[in-house]
Amino acid sequence: MPYLDTLGAIEELLSQLEKESIAEDKKKIIRASLYKKYFDDVISKNMEILSGAGGHDVFESYKQFLNVINALLLHRKITLLSKQINIFTTNIDLYIEKALEEGGFENNDGFNGRFKPCFDLGNFKKSLSRRSLHFDNISELPMFNLVKLHGSLTWELDDDKETIKFCRDLGLVQGVKDVALAATDAITIPNTPKPTIASLSAAAASTRANGSIDTFMEAYEKLMIVNPTKEKFMHTVLNQTYYELLRIYSNELEKENTVLFVMGFSFADEHIRKMTLRAANSNPTLKIYIFNRSSDSAKRFLDRFDNFKAAKNNNIKLVVPPKKKAEEGEPEEDEFEYTLGTINEHVFDKLLNEVSEKEEKIPTTEHEEQ
């Protein structure tokens, strides 16, 4: 955000649609219209991100985030602590990959190979060291493990139907754009007021399903992404990969003295929500900090987690923006919203400064100590 929209009610509507007793031709129109909105608002904009023509401010926030995390890892001077960090994301866009590449950061994204990069879980958790030219000193380089739990727009099923390969030009996205639904073939999905299945069904009554909907859905279903529905998977390979990547996520949370920062994620995904809560209960040394965009969103989050009544170790903390100083009798308002940019500014930048200052105070020679 704000360049790419959130899913809003799309996930909920798609899940409800399959349970409704509506004529199949109307379901087809509603389903295709919901996917069209998701494609137009989120997926197609990645063509502009790829070319550098869209979402520049958001891209700069990603670069700043990676710069700070990289600098923090460089402060790890002993080999007992590895210089690796895991980024788990359900986002399917290109921002992180582009920011990692432009920043020159070493990273594992699951792919290996130059001419035909292919995805393999064994490509994660690789470390990289550098040997100095003159003294043969060896130092570990900071490494980002990028785990895209819901797939990516850069993923494509290979001809063998069993391997995921890397697609640099977003050919599958372009393929969907080439057969985009015309306005007359779909119904409009409004942001406000919040649509319902009943309102969408009424709108679909004046539209007739035709071959263009089948062509659009056929192209869309080739995308290697986890769809915003309860029945998420259109590819067996993606289904298997999803649960294997979740296992990596779960294993990392079980490690001693792990910290998880959660940003821009609502935990609407039931699998990830239950897995995270289970890890918090089984690993008392795990600390979880969940950033909420606003105080209002924090209230909704507490409802989703039932006020963390099932959390036993008091190791999950909600982080909300500070309040402005209000005049007497006036309602309190948030000083700012937590976006990636403000999280960088108010949390990670300050953390890096504190670590740097502490390191500067440590005497490194007898002369400095005197």
Image (cartoon, rainbow, N blue to C red):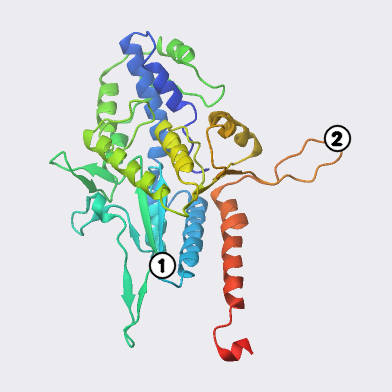
Q: Would you place residue 337 above or below residue 31 in this image? A: below
Query: For numbered disc 2, what is the local secondary structure?
Result: loop
Give the distance between the C-alpha atoms of the residues marked 2 and 1, in whole angstroms: 54 Å
Residue 48 is left or right of residue 320, and the answer is left
Name the kind of residue labelled 1 in the image: Leu
Using the rendered image of the protein, determine whether residue 87 is visible from the camera's viewpoint: yes
Q: Quadrant of residue 194?
A: top right
Residue identified by numbered label 2: 329
Residue 324 placement (x, y as % from top left)? 75, 45
Residue positioned 52% across, 32% down in the render: 310
Binning the other alpha carbons within 10 Å of mark 2 as few (below 14), some (14 to 19) or many (20 upward) gives few
Front residue (pair 222, 214):
222
Where's the C terminus, which quadrant?
bottom right
Residue positioned 55% across, 87% down in the render: 365
Residue 26 is left or right of residue 310, and the answer is left
Front residue (pair 242, 205):
242
Front residue (pair 67, 311):
311
Q: Would you place residue 29 above or below residue 233 in this image? A: above
Query: For numbered disc 1, what is the local secondary structure?
Result: loop
Residue 31 placement (x, y as % from top left)? 36, 21
Residue 55 is left or right of residue 233, and the answer is right
Residue identified by numbered label 1: 80
